[in-house]
Amino acid sequence: DTGVSQNPRHKITKRGQNVTFRCDPISEHNRLYWYRQTLGQGPEFLTYFQNEAQLEKSRLLSDRFSAERPKGSFSTLEIQRTEQGDSAMYLCASSPDADTQYFGPGTRLTVL
Amino acid sequence: AQSVTQLGSHVSVSEGALVLLRCNYSSSVPPYLFWYVQYPNQGLQLLLKYTTGATLVKGINGFEAEFKKSETSFHLTKPSAHMSDAAEYFCAVSDLGSGNTGKLIFGQGTTLQVKP
């Protein structure tokens, strides 16, 4: 059990560019969640995967955001045409049973 | 709909003093409740959780919390604060009790400062 890993840890981009983040969950965890955390706030739910199926998306996930989990293993979160309001920490969590979620270290996005 | 309110965005205690971080929740179904801790520039680490059964739950690093249904509360306590406890603490409720995805709804967080 090596924990949840996320890459990159930090990303600085210019407004209008596309960015992609990767999350590698704990092996054999079939549930995977993405959250967004802005400064001074608690994390907010973005989307949920059970294996490769995306079963829930938050209203926060505009059409510029897309997430995938091919083959039910790692997941990617892509943001197209980034805006300054997208600056945040993006957290990934995995769970074997939804009872306990294990969080990765996060990817901090700064949009200039 | 579920929600979490953490009373007090900043709490300051002296080293060795009691730590009390307050959390109230709203849930239309039996709640699953969690406390997480976050150190600067890191992800969240689970301190403890309540799902069913005993209402007093013990977690890591000497923390514990009591689920009080009548008060819709899940306050976090530690008898004696340590300097290493200084961090951001988040209370969360899960929608798993309603047969949903288990996503977490977090409070705004409480920053704990420990003074020497």
Image: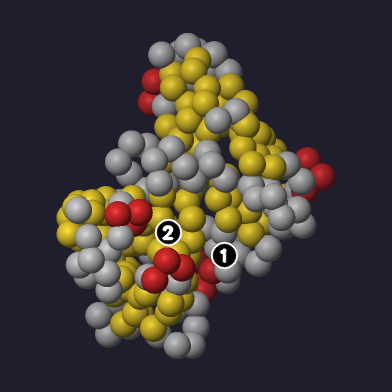
Residue toward you, B58 or B8: B58
Residue toward you, B8 or B61: B61
Instruction: Return the x and y of residue A5 as percentages of the image width and height.
Output: 64, 41
Residue at left offset 47%, top offset 42%:
B42
Figure check: B84 above or below A17: below
- Single out the residue that lies furthest toward the right: A71
CB within 8 Å, label 1 to label 2: no
Number of callouts in the render? 2
Residue at left offset 64%, top offset 59%:
A95
Q: Which residue is mark 2?
A: B36
Residue at left offset 68%, top offset 63%:
A96
The image quarter containing residue A111 is top left
> Can residue B15 be seen in this snapshot?
yes
Q: Locate the N terminus of chain A by quadrant.
A: bottom right
Instruction: Return the x and y of residue A37 as percentages of the image width and height.
Output: 41, 41
Amino acid on which disc 1 is placed: Thr
> Can residue A83 be seen in this snapshot?
no
Chain where mark 1 sits: A
- Single out the residue that lies furthest toward the bottom: B54
Residue at left offset 77%, top offset 46%:
A73
Mark 1 burial class by Cα count in 10 Å: few <14, some 14-19, many 20+? some
Cα–Cα gap, marks 1 and 2: 11 Å
Left or right of residue A42: residue A30: right
Left or right of residue B19: residue B52: right
Q: Which residue is mark 1?
A: A100
**Same-subunit check for callouts 1 and 2:** no
Instruction: Return the x and y of residue B97 as percentages of the image width and height.
Output: 51, 74
Amino acid on which disc 2 is placed: Tyr
The image quarter containing residue B15 is bottom left
